[in-house]
Image: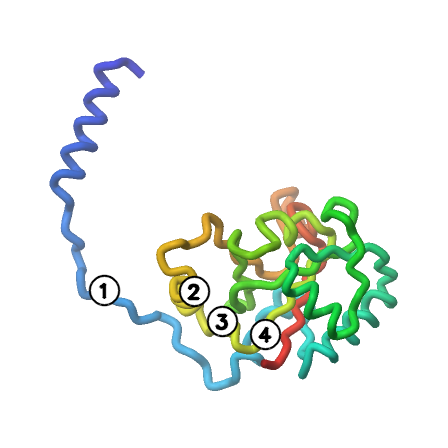
């Protein structure tokens, strides 16, 4: 691109920013959600939508039951290397009786355990952020991802989740906010669905009553 052409483009951008175009339908840019909550409970809605996306859901009435279920699952799957980076979550699980989190790093683990920011019932999604102690990589690099969530983290829609995030972080929003809906999958190769290409092959969500 010549210098003259570049200057012309920058000049047009500058003019456009100086004279913003009004929104053609201002009344359509409201804050109300297009999607309205269903009559069923959020726990049921999330579980149904999460399972549709090949996620594996389990409900626990207490952290003690959570630890018991995790222990049985680890024995059944023969997981010998479990990784958890979030100190608070690791302590709660250890105190409840699940002390199998011995993996030194995510690269060498069979499964990684994280928390989340919210559960979005309408889409069956886990909302996570770089504001968590697990950081950006733990839920992506492990072959199996286990998310521990609590009933007070359930919201209906993504807009509700973002409002919860704004209330929690105020002006210091995390640099990364991501939605995970079941195991990673792609159909780029000959339109054949393949699971676990760009992330975990399995995703579990344990919802704990609180």
Element type at mark 4 = strand
Residues at marks 4 and 3 touching, judged by CB atoms closer than 8 Å = no
Q: Nearer the viewer, mark 1 or mark 2?
A: 2
What percent of the width, then of the height, locates residue 64?
Answer: 74, 79
Label 3 vs 2, first from the N-terminus: 3
Residue for badge 4 = 150
Residue for badge 1 = 28
What percent of the width, then of the height, locates residue 71?
Answer: 81, 70
Q: Is residue 186 above or below residue 7?
A: below
Give the spatial CA distance, label 4 vs label 3.
17 Å
What percent of the width, then of the height, locates residue 190?
Answer: 65, 43
Label 4 vs 3, first from the N-terminus: 3
Residue for badge 3 = 122
Label 4 vs 1, first from the N-terminus: 1
Q: Nearer the viewer, mark 2 or mark 4?
A: 2
Q: Nearer the viewer, mark 3 or mark 2?
A: 2
Give the spatial CA distance, label 1 vs label 2.
28 Å
């Amino acid at each position: 691109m010549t210098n003259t052409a570049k200057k012309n483009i920058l000049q047009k951008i500058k003019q456009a920013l100086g004279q913003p175009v009004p929104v053609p339908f201002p009344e359509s840019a409201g804050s109300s959600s297009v999607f309205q909550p269903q009559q069923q409970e959020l726990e049921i809605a999330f579980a149904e939508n999460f399972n549709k996306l090949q996620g594996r859901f389990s409900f626990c009435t207490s952290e003690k039951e959570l630890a018991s279920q995790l222990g049985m699952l680890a024995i059944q799957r023969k997981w010998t290397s479990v990784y958890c980076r979030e100190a608070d979550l690791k302590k709660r699980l250890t105190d409840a009786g699940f002390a199998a989190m011995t993996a030194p790093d995510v690269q060498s683990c069979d499964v990684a355990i994280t928390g989340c920011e919210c559960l979005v019932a309408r889409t069956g999604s886990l909302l996570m952020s770089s504001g968590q102690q697990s950081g950006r990589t733990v839920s992506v690099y492990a072959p199996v991802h286990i998310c521990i969530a609590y009933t007070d983290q359930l919201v209906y829609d993504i807009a509700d989740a973002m409002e919860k995030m704004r209330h929690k972080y105020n002006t210091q929003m995390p640099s990364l906010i991501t939605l995970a809906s079941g195991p990673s999958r792609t159909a780029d190769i000959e339109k054949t669905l393949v699971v676990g290409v760009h992330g975990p092959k399995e995703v579990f969500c344990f919802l704990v009553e609180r």
